[in-house]
Image (cartoon, rainbow, N blue to C red):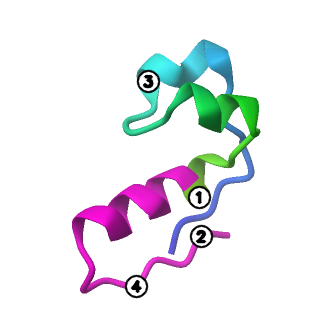
């Protein structure tokens, strides 16, 4: 379970693994971004992003 309400911003793209400029433009939450990355690499896990 991942809990974080912060959004990806341009100023922190270099510190958030797997984040993209598009994530910052779309104001994607940090947990949504990492949840997507985790399920891309491992299809046998369940990730709940809150």
1 or 3: mark nearer the eye: 1
Specify start and end residues of the magenta stretch as a single range. 33-50
The vertical placement of 40 against 9, above or below, is below
Disc 2 and disc 1 in contact, CB within 8 angstroms: yes
Q: Residues within 10 Å of mark 2 (few under 14, many from 20)?
A: some
Q: Residues within 10 Å of mark 1 (few under 14, many from 20)?
A: many
Q: CA distance from mark 2 to mark 3?
A: 19 Å
Mark seen at residue 46:
4
Residue underneath mark 2: 49
- Where residue 6 sits in the image (x, y, percent)? 72, 43
Q: CA distance from mark 4 to mark 2?
A: 10 Å
Q: CA distance from mark 1 to mark 4?
A: 13 Å
The residue depicted at 69 percent of the width and 46 percent of the height is: 28
Mark with earlier residue (2, 1): 1
Mark with earlier residue (4, 3): 3
Q: Residue 41: say if magenta.
A: yes
């Amino acid at each position: 379970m991942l809990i974080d309400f912060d959004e990806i911003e341009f100023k922190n793209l270099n510190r958030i693994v797997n984040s993209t400029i598009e994530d910052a433009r779309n104001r994607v939450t940090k947990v949504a971004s990492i949840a997507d990355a985790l399920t891309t690499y491992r299809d046998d896990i369940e990730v709940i992003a809150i």
